[in-house]
Image (cartoon, helix red, strand yellow):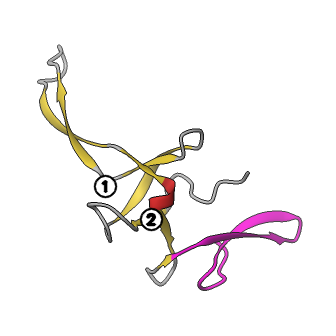
Amino acid sequence: MAAKLKKDDTVVVLTGKDKGKQGKILSVSPSTGKAVVDGINIAIRHVKASQNDQGGRQPKAMPIQLSNLALVDAKGKPTRVGFKMDGDKKVRFAKTTGDVI
């Protein structure tokens, strides 16, 4: 199945503690159905000091379910993603505006 959300897409969070926040997808894991979004779902992780790093408590973006994310269209509103054939290529489009992504 084709991916509706991909790396570097701008998304908005639909539910949870970060509801309404926008961010860019850093990575997607289709097997688990989760994505890591920059600045969203931040948790504090304790990092051991190493020769190159001081260590301590550092914030880290944790994965969030893909079902809790929606793509942001050209107008800045959340939209669902659909697929259509453009010539002989399969492309993604925003359901609200119909624009190709």
Identify whether 20 is placed above or below 99: above
Give left or right: position of 42 versus 69: left
Q: Which residues are magenta?
A: 79-101
Q: Which residue is mark 2?
A: 11
| Label 2 Cα neighbours within 10 Å, binned few <14 / some 14-19 / many ≥20 | many
Residue 62 in the magenta stretch? The answer is no
Earlier sequence position, callout 1 versus callout 2:
2
All told, the count of numbered labels is 2
Q: Amino acid at mark 2?
A: Val
The numbered dot on residue 40 is: 1
Instruction: From the viewer's side, name the closer residue of 45 and 9.
Output: 45
Q: Position of residue 18 (x, y in %)?
A: 28, 62
Asked which secondary structure carries label 2, the reply is: strand
- When asked about the image quadrant of residue 43, the answer is top left
Q: Which amino acid type is shown beneath numbered disc 1?
A: Ile
Answer left or right for 99 relative to 34.
right
* Residue that appears at 45% across and 54% down: 25
Are the residues tagged 1 and 2 within 8 Å (C-beta)? Answer: no
**Which mark, by number, is residue 10?**
none
What residue appears at the point 13 percent right and 25 percent down from the top-left corner? 55
